Image (cartoon, rainbow, N blue to C red):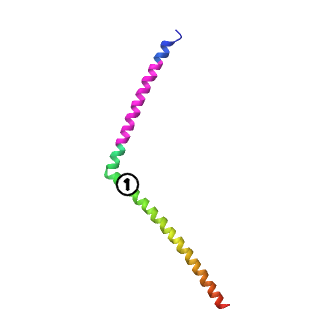
Amino acid sequence: MFGLKEMRRKRDLLHAKTKAMEQLASDSRQQYKSKVLNLASSPQGLGLSFIAGATTQCDVVNSQRNLLLATARTELLMMGKQYLAQWMDKNS
């Protein structure tokens, strides 16, 4: 009556499919976690970690060097202006 048996069968089928997909997703997440942990603890993973750390350190060093060069450039320009002003005062 009113197709209740058919609706219940479809609901049960959909529920079974959902449970299967949830289990598949759970297994997939577990495999991914295992692969990541295995890679991180392997020599290759440790090497990649070292390279990433060295790259970060190089970026920090480069930014500090650029800051130092910019400051030195500014100081040299100011000294040049002062020297030029003194030289022009002497010659005038």
**Residue indicated by mark 1:** 49
Seen in the picture, residue 70 relative to 21 is either above or below; the reply is below
Residue positioned most to the right: 92
Q: Secondary structure at mark 1?
A: helix
Quadrant assignment, res 35:
top left
State yes or no: residue 65 in magenta: no
State yes or no: residue 13 in magenta: yes
The amino acid type of the residue labelled 1 equals Ser
Seen in the picture, residue 77 relative to 63 is either above or below; the reply is below
In the rendered image, residue 19, in percent from the top left (x then y), is placed at 41, 26
Residue positioned most to the bottom: 91
Seen in the picture, residue 63 relative to 46 is either above or below; the reply is below
29 sits to left or right of 89: left
In the rendered image, residue 44, in percent from the top left (x then y), is placed at 34, 52
**Residue displayed at 62% across by 86% down:** 86
68 sits to left or right of 81: left
